[in-house]
Amino acid sequence: MRCVADETSTLPATGWAVLGLLSFGEELSGYDVKKRSDRSLRFFYWSPSFSQIYSELKRLEKAGYAVSRTVSQESGTRDKRVYRITDAGMTAVREWVREAPLDPPVLKHGPMLRLWLGHLLEPEQMREVLVQHQEFAESMRDRALADAERAGSYPALTLKWAERYYTSERDLAAAMLDDLDALSSGRVRHP
């Protein structure tokens, strides 16, 4: 029998995310995992690609954290493989959630990088970057609100956090547009 501690040290974050999606108790295909990650994980972590998902499902099955079976399709299309979490997988993901060190968020912010390099852009190009980010943040905020209506309790709380986060990103972009106007008019000195 595998020791949970041995497996937890080798499972990547994507594996924990996929196992977490299985922990809600339903059998899911790789396609189902991708749809659910797009409706939840992408708002606060990232949404793994199909290849990452299928790779992690195989890894989880090999570790004994998930089992799979083939399901015949009524529509005559090819059969699909569905996965469910095992008791060992539930124990492992509970232990990971409770015991694993908390990694601080890593900010990888494309618009902020562009702003930092704003001296290489025309003011109107910088404005366009900020406007695009403002529109993106608003669309993500709206999507998080819509997805929260269909989510369970803790996923809904996470989506509420995402809604607040994207609201602040939208508002920060608006404030940066004001700052850019002030900089262009000479009211703000260069650092």
Image (cartoon, grey):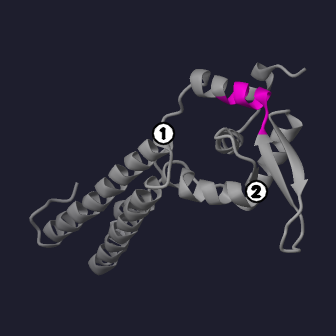
Secondary structure mainly formed by the magenta segment: helix
Q: CA distance from mark 2 to mark 1?
A: 22 Å
Q: Mark 2 against mark 1, which lies toward the viewer?
A: 1
Percent from the top left, x then y, of residue 13? Answer: 66, 40
Residue indicated by mark 2 = 30
Q: If the image is split into quadrants, where does the C terminus sit?
A: bottom left
Judge whether 165 appears above or below 10 on screen.
below
- For the point 59% across and 28% down, the residue is 97
Lateral position of residue 44 relative to residue 85, left or right: left
Residue indicated by mark 1 = 154
Lateral position of residue 56 relative to residue 121, left or right: right
The three-letter code of the residue at mark 1 reads Tyr
Magenta segment: 85-93
Front residue of 101/25: it is 25
- For the point 30% across and 61% down, the residue is 170
Percent from the top left, x then y, of residue 181? Answer: 17, 71
Is residue 25 magenta-colored? no
Residue 9 visible in the current orientation: no
Front residue of 114/22: it is 22
Q: If the image is split into quadrants, where does the N terminus sit?
A: top right
Lateral position of residue 27 relative to residue 172, left or right: right
- For the point 13% across and 67% down, the residue is 182
Percent from the top left, x then y, of residue 55? Answer: 81, 51
